[in-house]
Amino acid sequence: MKRHAFEPARLLTGLTALGVGGAYVGEAARAWELPGALPVLAVPAGLCLSGITAAVWSAVRRRRSSPGQSSPRQPSPGQP
């Protein structure tokens, strides 16, 4: 099986979908009663959190991939 890079934004999106789906299943089984707007608002909130996570993760990966960029450039010998 081919290995894939870890993507935390996709993990958060999947967990949000599972949580909302579980909430609807629990309400359909009459295990509990949720306020009507809670599951509807959880999806956009999860997607926004996922987008923020993707942006931060992208910035972290970009910074890790260019290690020589953070050190200041030193003059070569013979140049003032």
Image: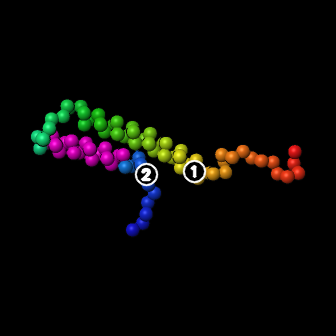
Residue 36, above or below 66: above
The structure residue drawn at horizontal position 40% and vertical position 42%, both measured from the top left corner, is: 50
Q: Residue at x 16, y 43 (%)?
A: 26
Q: Per the image, is 74 magenta?
A: no
Residue 39, given in percent of the width and then of the height, sits at: 25, 37
Q: Which of the two marks, 1 or 2, is nearer to us in this view? A: 1
Screen quadrant of the N terminus: bottom left
Q: Position of residue 10 (x, y in %)?
A: 39, 49
Q: Which mark is residue 7?
A: 2
* Residue at the limit of the structure toward the left, as seen here: 30
Which quadrant of the figure has residue 40? top left
**What is the three-letter code of the residue carrying label 2?**
Glu
- Residue 64: image tag: 1
What is the crowding at mark 2: few (fewer than 14 residues within 10 Å), some, or many (at least 20)?
Answer: few
Q: Please give the name of the residue rendered at 23% of the width and 45% of the height, measured from the top-left corner.
A: 21
Pick whichever of labels 1 and 2 is earlier in the sequence: 2
- Farthest residue in the bottom direction? 1
Assign a secondary structure to mark 1.
Answer: helix
Count of residue discs: 2
Q: Which residues are magenta?
A: 12-28
Q: Is residue 17 left or right of residue 34?
A: right
Q: Quadrant of the C terminus?
A: top right
Q: Residue at x 43, y 63 (%)?
A: 3
Q: What amino acid type should be assigned to the residue bearing mark 1?
A: Arg
SS under mark 2: loop
Left or right: residue 69 compared with residue 32: right
**Magenta run includes residue 14:** yes
